[in-house]
Each structure stands twice: as structure tokens, then as C-alpha cells.
Amino acid sequence: MDFLNAIVALANFVIVPGMAYGAQLALGALGVTLIYGILRFSNFAHGDTMAMGTMFVILITWGFQSAGISFGPLPTALLALPFGIALTGLLLIGTDKMVYQFYRQRKVKPVVMVMVSLGVMFIMNGLTRFIIGPGDQRFADGERFIISAREFKAMTGLKEGLAIKTSQGLTVVTAVIVVAVLFWFLNRTRTGKSMRAYSDNEDLALLSGINPERVVLYTWLIVAALATVAGTLYGLDKSFKPFTYFQLLLPIFAAAIVGGLGNPLGAIAGGFVIAFSEVTVTYAFKKVANYVLPDALAPDGLAQLMSTDYKFAVSFSILIIVLLFKPTGLFKGKSV
Amino acid sequence: MIEVHDLHKHFGGFHAVDGSTLTIKQGSITGLIGPNGAGKTTLFNVIAGVLQPTSGKVIMDGEDITGLPPHTLFGKGLLRTFQIAHEFSSMSLRENLMMVPADQAGEKLWNTWFGRKRIADEERALAAKADEVLEFLTIDHISDERAGNISGGQKKLLELGRTMMVDAKIVFLDEVGAGVNRTLLNTIGDAIIRLNKERGYTFVVIEHDMDFIGRLCDPVICMAEGRVLAEGTLDEIKANEQVIEAYLGTGLKNKVASA
Amino acid sequence: MTRRDALLFVFVGLLILVTGFAQSWNSALYILNMGLISAILALGVNLQWGLAGLFNVGIMGFVALGGLAAVITSMPANAEEWSAGGFQVLAGLLLGAGTIIAAIMAYQRLPKGRTRGLTMVAILIGGFFLFRYVFDAGVEAVEAVNPASTGYLGGLGLPVLVAWPVGGLFAAGAAWIIGKTALGLRSDYLAIATLGIAEIIISVMKNEEWLSRGVKNVVGLPRPTGVPYEIDLQNSASFVEKAAGFGLDASTASTLYVKLGYSLLFTVVLVVLLWLAQKALNSPWGRMMRAIRDNEVAAEAMGKDVTARHLQIFILGSAICGIAGAMMTTLDGQLTPTSYQPLRYTFLIWVMVIVGGSGNNFGSVLGGFLIWFLWVQVEPMGLALMGLITSGMSDGYWLKDHLIESAAHMRLLTMGVVLLLVLRFSPRGLIPER
Amino acid sequence: MKKLLLATTATALMTGAAFADGHANTVKIGVILGFTGPLESITPQMADGAELAMKEVTDSGLLLDGATVESVRGDSTCVDAGAATAAAERLVTSDKVNAIMGADCSGVTGAILQNVARANGIVMVSPSATSPGLSTAEDDGLFFRTSPSDARQGVIVTNILQDRGVNSVALTYTNNDYGKGLADAFQAEFEAAGGEVTISAAHEDGKADYSAEVGALASAGGEVLVVAGYVDQGGSGVIRGAIDSGAFDTFYLPDGMVGTKLNDVFGEELNGSFGAYPGTDSEGAATYGEMAKAAGYDGTSAFSAESYDAAALIMLAMQAAKSSASADFKDHIFDVANAPGEKIFPGELDKALKLIAEGQDVDYVGASAVELVGAGESAGNYQEIEFSDGVYSTIKYR
């Protein structure tokens, strides 16, 4: 029984939140990694792209809510998602035409593109706050829990509860679907294959008649979808605030690099590595240890490796260690 | 002078250099030929320290130099040029040459602030030497031009010029004639012969132009698929069955690929 | 400097003068002072980026280390805390350092294989617990002393001017460690690594209270010699008399006097650094650096030790950022770790370097002044602009309300637009590399 | 009207200092708050609060022979001491504000106080800087705050917990001088009184995820979770995680955590939780809440009431000193804030001005029950709140 309690406690405080957070990071990191793989630069504006995409979704959700449209037990935001993706897609393609295209055609160094994305980041940052304001926005509705801690305890009779929020379940399910669709697209469709070819070897792809502008267009559309989905899921699970989305950029980059920049599988793995490292290294194992170990061995202290103050430092230390020993990431990334 | 023992360089499953063994004699101008993808440039890069070998050894004058970084090899008198010219594009031709000599006093940060006199003298000598080299290469009329703005052939000359700024022992030239017109190629050829005769440089030359090879090189080494096929004078090589097959094979493959 | 460059400097000078006439001379001088610091920061980053092509996105960390140096150098030592556990903290730190050194030695001495891995893990884990055991107790003792106003070890009580070079040394030390480990990485990876390391530095400064009070801030840093306190000037009869001679009241005169004092100190630092940077740039050393930036492979083949040179310039540039960080903390008079945000202390500096002109020292100095001016002045300009746009709208109209409320966000927007415009129409910056 | 004020602010800025001397009968108060930066979401309500008081006074026409009070906003960014000092510098030396309502975060507040306010002899009243360090900062008698120092709150929290028989708590704090200061003060007090703090874990505001913090807190355990954070920052994030995962059912909510947002966001889920925030009387706060609602903003947002009070104190002190010069009215702030005298609540500023003009004493209570002590900070009278039926209500004063 104690053993079960230990597992449940671990699941409740480490595994479930880690899964949801990891899935959110993975979706964000996929966007970063795709841009890196195909357009060949690190996009510093990605966090703010997520914020803008989510902002569109929120505005549409509010419209739906005031029109009385709902999605039953699921959040209305899911209904608004396709529209949000479309708007974000338009925004990104517009940005590309107005900004990135110019530099791409001049074949500037990747670092210049990074600088350009810095400018785009500043602008999106300002625009989001201009339109929706800097504050917290709530747009979640529908059922909150798939199973709540109290229900779980009543059901199983265990001392520990296990809670799974709708948003957490939704995050993982959506992430799986999105990743499956993405991989199907990249591996099975003609456009997807040409994108991969372009990513592997630009010159060769051009020779075999792939239209680069088309590849770029599709890339931005996919990035728009990934960013909007990631941002919305994150907003549903936690809350929407522009400042937070800028802060998300760092763990997302860490995830993409740990996994290997330019490698979609790596991005997903990286997301989970970062999420779980943040949760486990700073987790106080006291409770779990008390359940599992005999009383004589139970720890007096918290059995915490590091205080939560250093949560952020942990993910970056992992990033740096990975870079030092495996410079192209866990999964082989690009080394352009 | 240089001995290469059973050198391997693998990229994943691809064996770019697959057990090459060869010797380069002091004072020679050795030609290195072979069809595209034979592993010539990779061999250069491994010898010059740009790439680490998977296995094998490189010995220079009895000393094991395997895997030493390029700047250390430079210090030992081993210089190289690049297949695609690697000029310092934002600097003038003269500056491109002046930066070459090692251990300049002006490269010590301290001296840039407190050793001005010494630097000035040194710079004057370097500039004079650079101008001399530029004149030798017949590109002295553009010595103040940015290296990024000159023609491909002129960049090749500049590459050669860099090797003349110091007392090199052995110089590796990677397709020094590619994209260069006939007149310029002859100029380059003359320069190489003069450097070999007057200064005693040893040269290793990768080149596809057989006339050029024939005029300069003895011996000639032919590579294919990462291995040394044959060594001898150009005529001997031309008569070698294996060599003909190697060239023919890729020729056929090329035809298939371009169809 | 060409005539055009000189005109650009005159233009920025005019902007500051206009501030003086239209707003106040105090505002103008404050912008000038922070502009001087920004110029020094931009100079340091330009050294790394413009001269060596190193993409350092961890500027914030070096600035913060400079700030830390200001506290450790200039604040008085807290005897009570030292006796409570100061030496135990030091012992703990030595143990920690010893553990890492032992692990590295094990790595180097032992033959490759499982034994080596296990030994290293054993050393690290054992060392970690030993370190925590000694260190944590010491920290607890130190932090328990008077936590509301001190609770940290304090500093050396030296003049704060000493902190400026010390800040440079701190940053240089950190840069050495970072450079040794991360400089081999490609540009994008180096960027993310430095970004992360800067965050780690900040989180250490936020959470290690024994060191500099963590998030509780150290206030009341001493001023540099030669910069008096306004209130003392205002109470000095002779100063008030002199001020009256200029037709100024005591408070205006004293605030201007103090700011001018800082301006003078900062200008000296900037001029010295600029002179050093210019001499270095135009020497064979600068030529070698540009060669490395233009083509690393060829420079390596021409006998230049690229790795060592990168490390050298990374340390130099970071040290300059550290000096600027110490100066900034001195000007603020307090250390506030929570105020170090990447947007302000890293990305804004990058905007300065790129807009000014990377590879050109004068360009980055100009960029430092110009962008700092905009950063401060876009806010009132934005408000004024919104006032103008909405002047035709009726009061209470939601859009008018919204636009005026949002005026403050014009700042980020403007930075983005300026950066993109410069990248598009003058990609090498306002004063390009010659 | 609020918009009008803003518009005049903008025009005043455009015309610059040249006009400042022309309006002899204009009083300017600088509102320096973090309009951008990590506290940007609570800042508008704080500024609105201060400007509501100014509007009230202007409309009354009673301040210093009918002076108009003008608000000049400046962005403190909350975190960037340089930018904050520049903004303050501009407000003080260019717009010639008579006093500063601000700043918000303790760090920039200290910087502005030392570099601008003291240098120019300008009064500063901060609505939200609670760091105990500011109590002892040299201020030449220029610095006041309408929020109590965290040291005082540590005692209050301990008392409330002990009265409820709570002996073991987990503690999380927002990682800045407010949160850390409060956490330190509370932990010392609570442990001295025999209580146990199982863990004291920091959380960063505006971060992506609080799973790690919640996990650590849950594992450490405790009867109650004390959340020393901000209601619309990480504090709510931690509570959200703790409730959702069933880690804690009962929370203690200090001043930064109390706001109607809790009712909206958590409602029933917080039933049984309790806390306390400054105030001796619910009347002022309620009135203020309604006034704010009528003016179109949320008056219960953190430190909004304190901002209203800060601005009101400045203006009442001016009236008492019969001068809008900081040097004159700085000594009157204590008089108008404390007894004896007639109690003044929000919306009664006209009455206060009239009384003062008649030479009578007032005791400004305001929206947050202002009572200044010591080095010019709020005494720290608290109202204890408890959640039931999804809303919190005051049950006791301390």
C-alpha cells in the first residue's frame, strides 16, 4: 500500500505535470527546430509568435463565448484554434515577405537572420501588449478535471491523490496528434519530402526542381500551427500573459538544443528532458522516501538535491553539459 | 619528407580516405590526381590538421604530426591553399599577405599600446615583402583592393602568395588552377617552379589539368575511392590499366547521373 | 572618422542638448551618463562580435558580475556575520572547488573506461554532499544575523572606484571559464549557452544571500571620490553662493554638479577604453582578428591559433562589460539582482551595436548613445504621439482610452522597428566598418 | 475624466517645461510605476487609483485656492533602475512635479529615492514598496509609504496562524525583496513562537511552470501553505498547482495575494483559506472599490487602494502646509495621516480639504486604513479574511 502511495505521489507531482509541461515545451521546440532546420536560423521571436497566436485564439474564443458557442466539456478555445492558426499563418507569411525574404535572397549569414528575428521579437512583443494588454487573460472554460485528487482518493482509498486536469490530458493528446500529423506530413507527402530534402541539402534540392519559396511558405504555416497550438495549450493549462511567453523562449531553446537543433524527434525528447529535469532535480523526495523506506531509514530533511530557486539553472546546466559532451544534441542535429 | 601510413577517414558509413599510404620526397613537386570523389581533398585536410583521421599516421621529417591543429603545422612549415579560395574578404590584398607571418610583435595586445615603434618598423618590412610578393605574382596593381572584390583567378594567386610570405618547407596546393585562365595558369606554374628551384619548397599539387600536371609534376600519384592506385611519371600513370578503369568508371557513372 | 560619422555624433549631441533645453539639464545629463555606460557596454560587445564574430548573448551576466564587484569591493565588512559563519562558508566553497578540481584531475589522469567514469561520479557525489554539509550550515549562520538589514558578509570597504577594475576582473574570470568550455561551439549554440550561463549567474546572485543579500538588495553603496552628496552641497554655504552666481538655485546646482562629476569619471573611462580599442583594432593584432572573423579555416591554416585568440577577445570584451556593470551599479547606488533582465541588459545592447555599426568602435559608441536616448525618450514621445493621434477622438471612446493606456509599449515596438530599418537599409550600421 | 487627465498629460509633455511655470495654479504629481515589465498587469489599476484621487481633488476645487492637480506618468519598469531613474529625473527636473507617487518595486524605489528624490528634495510616497530595508534608508524625511513594512506583517501572520492552532506550514515566496523579506520575517517570527516551517521555497514570477515548486512543497508537507507572492503573478500559479494536485487545501494569503481576482479565479476552491491585508475598517476599502468600479477599473487589484491613499496624502499635506513645495509639506504628511482629527474615507477628500483649510485636524484613513508610524511607513493594521462560499470576507481586525 505504501508502495502504491509512493508511486501515486510521484505520478501526481512529477510525472503528470512533467508530461504536460514537457509536451508544451516539445511543441514550442518543434517550431524552433523546424525554422532552424529549413530556414537555418535560431528564431528569437518564437516565444512572442506563440504569444500572438494565443492572443488571436483568445480574441476569437471571447467572440464565441459571447455568441454562446461552446464545445461541451472541452474548452471553447479548441474551436477557435483553426482560426487562430490561420491568422498566425498570415502574420508569419506577412512577416516573411516584409522582413526575412529580403535577407534570405541575399544569402546573409545565419547570425544576421538571428539579429533580424531579434527585431521581429521586439515588434511582436510590443504589438501583443498593444492589442491585448500586458495583463493576465482568462479564456479557459469547460470541465476542469478528468479526475481530481479527491475523486481519486475516494475511488482507490489511497492516502495520496492523483489529479489529471482536462488541460493536461488535452495537452498530451493534442501534442501526440500534432506530432503524428507533422511526421506523416514530413515523411509521406510530396511537400513534406521536399521540405526535408531542402533541409538536408539546399543546393541539391534546388537542382531537383523544388521551389524554395514554396518550402518556406509551408514552413511558416507549419510553424504558425505549432506555435499557436503550443501557446494555446500552455495558456489553457496555466494562464496567458505576454511576459510569460517571452520567458518561455529560454526553456524552449534549451529543449531544442538538448535534443539537437534541426531534428524534430530531438525537439520532442528535449522538451521532456528539460521539463522532467526541472521537476525532478528540485523535487523533495522526502514524502516518497517516507513511504518506501522503513521508518529507521526515513530522511529527516527534505531529500532535495537543490532548492527550487535553482530550477532554471538546472535546465541550463543540463543544456551546457549536453553541448560539451555531445555538441549536436542527444539526437544528431544539424551542424551547418 | 612526409610519410602517410594507412590513413583512414570515415564520415559515418562513407569511407572518404580508405587506407592511403604514400611518401612525398623532399624537393619534389608531387602531383595528386584522381577522379572526383577520390578523396584527394579529404586527404589534404587530414594531413593539414583540419580533419582528425579515423586511423593511421602522418609523419613529417620523422616526427608524428597526426591530428595536430593547422596553426601548429604552419609553425612547422606545412602550408596549404584551398580548393575554393579562402581569402580574408574584408581586407586588402596587401593586408591578406601581411597577416601571414607568425609571431609578429604587433600580434601581442600589449605591444599595440606600448610597443608602437617596434610595430611600425616591423610593419614597414612586412609591407615591403608583401609588395614584393604581389609583384612576383603580377597582381601588384590591385594591392589595395579588398580581397572580396577580385576575380577567382586572382584569389588563387593570392593564396599562393600567402605561402611565399614565410619560409615554407612543404606547400599543399588544392586545385590551384581551377577556374583560372590559361595565361594565369602558366603564371602560377612558373611561380611554383621558381619557388621549388630557388627556395627549395616541396609542393603537393591537386589538379585536373593534365598539361599542368605534366609540365610541373614528378612523380604523380593517382587516387581513387580513397586509396592510392598508382605512382610514377604522368605517362606511366596514363598507361596504367587500373587508372584508366577508375576514370572510365566514374565517367560512365557521370553519364548515367546526368542523363 | 569621416565627415558623415562626425555629423552623426553631432546629431546625437544635439539630441541631448535639445533634451537639456526642452526638458531639463538634469535629464540631459542623466541620459548622457547612462549613454556613456551604454557606449562602454557596446564597445565591449563590439570587440567580441564586430572584431571576432563571437555571438555572446550573456552580456547580462557580466554586467551583473560587475555590480557584484561593486558590493564586494566597496561595502564595509560585516564582522558579526563573519564570526557567525563566514569562514565556514569560505571553507565550504573551497571544498566545492576542490571537488571539481579532483574530478577534473581524475578525468585527466585515469585511463579511459568505466573506472574513470565511476571514480568521477563518486568524487562528484561525495564532494557535493560534503560541500552542502559544510557550506549550508555556514550560510544559515550568516544569513541569520540581522536578516532585515544585513545578513551577508559585506565587502572590503575599499573606495568604489576600485570596484570598476575589479568588476572587469570578475567578468574576465567568468569569461575564462565560459570560454574554456563553450567557445568551441558554433555561433547559435554559443549564443544559447551564454544566454543560459547569464541566467545561472543571475540566479546565483538572487539566491546566495550571504554573498550580496540576494533579492533583498544592497542599498547605499558609497559614491566615488570626487562625487559628493547633493544634500551636503545644498548645506554648504559656499556652494550655494557659487550656484547663485550662476543664477541657479541650490538643488538644481547640486544635482547638476553631482551628475557632471559622474560624467567626467565615465568620460575618462570611455576615452581610455576607446583609445585602447582603436589602437588594438588598427594594429597587426586587429588585422589578425579580422582575418579570423573573415575566415577561420584559412586563418588557422596561416598559423593563427584561432581558439586562443577567441578566448582572449571573449575575456577582453566581457571584462569591459564587467567594468560597465560596476559603473552602472555605482551610479544607481545599489545592487538589485532582480533588475537584471535579458531584454534590457543583453538584447538592448545588441541593438546598440548593430544600429551603431559592428566592427567599428566609434559606431558602437554612437549606437550606445543613440539607442539609450531612444530607450528613455520614446516613452514621452509615444505618449505625445498617442495624444496627437487621439486628439480627434471623443473622450471616453474606447480606442482613445486603449491607445493612451498602451503608449508605454511603444518602447519595445520602436526598438524593433529601428533595428529592422537599420538592418534593411544600412545593414552594416550607421557607421560601418571602414 | 480619467482620459481627459491623460490627454492633458500628453499635451503637457509635448509642450514641455516652458508651460510649467505658466500655470501657477497647477499642482503636478508624478506617477512612477512599472507600466512595462513584470508588474505591468497590476500597474494600470494603481495609476488609476492615484489619478482618481487627483481628479477628486481637482473637481472639488478646494486645494490651494482651486488648484488643478495634474498627473504625469513615468515608467519605472519595476526592474531597470537606470530607466526608472531617467523617468524620475525627467518628471522632477523637466515636468517639475511637486511630488512623486511611487515607485512600485522596492529596488527602483530605492534608486529613485537616492538619486532623484533626495537630490532634488522631492517627497515620495510609495504605495507598494514593502522592503524592510527602506525603513532604515536615509531619506531626509522625504520618503513615506502607505504599505506596511514586511517585518510587521511577519508578526501578524504568526499571530493568525497560532490563533487557529496551526503549527506546521510550508512557505513559498516570490523571489524578490518583497517576497523574500516577508518570508524571512515570518519564518523567524513563527519559529520563535514554536511553529515549524517545513520548507521555504522561492518561486519566480512570470515563469513558465510551477510544477517543481508545487512538488517540493507537497513533499515537505504542512497544515497550511503560506504564499508570499502576488495575486496575478506566480502566487496564483502556485496555488493553482497546489489545489489541482491536491497538495494543499488551505492557504494563508498575505497582502500581495488578496484581491477579488481570487474570487473569480478560485472561488469555492479556496473555501477555508485565510489571510490578512492592511486595513482597519472595511468601509473605506468597500467605498473605494465602488468608486473604482464607477471609474471603470478594478479597485481591488493589488496596491490600487494604497496608490489612491498615497496620492491623497500628498495633496492633503499640501493643503495643510498651504504650499505645494515638497520642502514645506513633507512635515505635514504625518499630521494628516494620523489621529487626532476627523476620519477621512475615500470619496471624502473634498471634506478633508475643507476641514484642513478651516484649520482643523484630519485623520486620513482612506482606502487602506492609513496609519503612519516610525520612519513614515504604514503601521500595519490588518484585516483578517477568510474564504467561505467562494468569496473572501473580513472577519476580524488586528
Image (spheres, coloured by chain):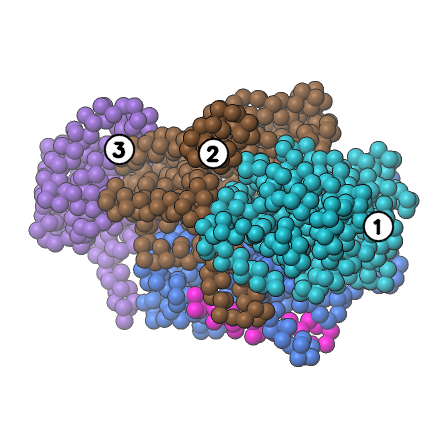
Chain colours: A blue, B purple, C brown, D cyan
- Check disc 3 and report the residue beneath it: C284
Do dots 1 and 3 share one subunit? no
Q: Secondary structure at mark 2?
A: helix
Amino acid bearing label 3: Pro
Asked whether residue A16 is drawn in magenta, I would say: no
Q: Secondary structure at mark 3?
A: helix
Q: Is residue B4 left or right of residue B134?
A: right
Crowd tier of the residue under label 1, counting other residues whose Cα lies within 10 Å: few below 14, some 14–19, many 20 or above:
many
Residue at 32%, 32% (x, y): give it: C275
Image quadrant assignment for residue C48: top left
Q: Chain of mark 2?
A: C
Q: Is residue C83 left or right of residue B256?
A: right
The numbered mark at residue C253 is 2
Q: Chain of mark 1?
A: D
Q: Which residues are magenta?
A: A71-95
* Camera-nearest label, 3 or 2: 2
Dominant secondary structure of the residues highlighted in magenta in the image:
helix
Lower sequence index among marks 3 and 2: 2
Q: In the image, is residue D388 above or below residue B27?
A: below
- Check disc 1 and report the residue beneath it: D384
Return the x and y of residue D293 as percentages of the image width and height: 71, 64
